[in-house]
């Protein structure tokens, strides 16, 4: 046998390299859309979680205030601070002078979807910088997102 016939090739052929690149391209084409859908799904989940926390805080407030919901004008202060049985917020932020109820949440959560993403404002009517719409008569709070839908086609306002 010749020495040349015994020597083995240790390099990849051009065809082997092309096949590897094509396989990587196929995997990327499958994985990238799934990852982007995961981010929007996370925002949807965060919205649901934030709404659940706000609704529980409103319910607890009503339970401690003779079934009266917090006023829309003072919503943030009443949810994150102290109040008395009549629903008057503590003027100095302490429990002094009968302001023994609260706080119900640490902070108003930010909106995670739609055009008002990042806003944590609460109002009774639609507002440009308001993330949440609140009805002080019924205690219902919703995301201030009117036309946008989640990946499954459900309107955010219906969460």
Image (cartoon, helix red, strand yellow):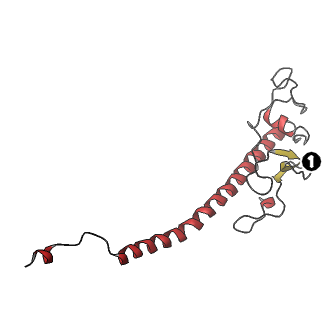
What residue appears at the point 49 percent right and 70 percent down from the top-left corner? 27
Q: Secondary structure at mark 1?
A: loop
Residue 14 position within the rendered picture, expressed as x and y whole percent measured from the top left: 36, 76
Q: How many marks?
A: 1
Q: Quadrant of residue 68?
A: top right
Of 114 and 151, nearer the camera is 114
Position of the N terminus, as image quadrant, is bottom left
Residue 83 position within the rendered picture, expressed as x and y whole percent measured from the top left: 85, 30
Q: Is residue 64 visible?
A: no
Q: Is residue 117 left or right of residue 20?
A: right
Q: Is residue 50 left or right of residue 5?
A: right
Of 102 and 73, nearer the camera is 73
What residue appears at the point 59 percent right and 67 percent down from the top-left corner? 33
Residue denoted by label 1: 137
Residue 157 position within the rendered picture, expressed as x and y whole percent measured from the top left: 81, 59
Asked if residue 151 is positioned above or below residue 79 in the image, the reply reads below
Position of the C terminus, as image quadrant, is bottom right
Residue 5 position within the rendered picture, expressed as x and y whole percent measured from the top left: 14, 78
């Amino acid at each position: 046998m010749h020495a040349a016939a015994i020597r083995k090739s240790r390099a990849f052929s051009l065809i082997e390299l092309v096949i590897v690149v094509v396989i990587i391209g196929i995997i990327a084409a499958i994985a990238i859309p799934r990852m982007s859908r995961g981010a929007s799904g996370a925002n949807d989940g965060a919205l649901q979680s934030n709404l659940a926390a706000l609704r529980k805080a409103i319910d607890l407030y009503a339970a401690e205030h003779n079934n009266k919901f917090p006023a829309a004008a003072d919503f943030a202060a009443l949810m994150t601070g102290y109040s008395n049985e009549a629903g008057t917020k503590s003027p100095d932020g302490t429990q002094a002078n009968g302001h023994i109820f609260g706080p119900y949440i640490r902070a108003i959560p930010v909106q995670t979807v739609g055009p008002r993403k990042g806003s944590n404002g609460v109002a009774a009517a639609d507002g440009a910088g308001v993330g949440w719409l609140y009805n002080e008569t019924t205690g219902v709070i919703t995301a201030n997102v009117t036309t946008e839908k989640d990946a499954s086609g459900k309107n955010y306002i219906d969460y």
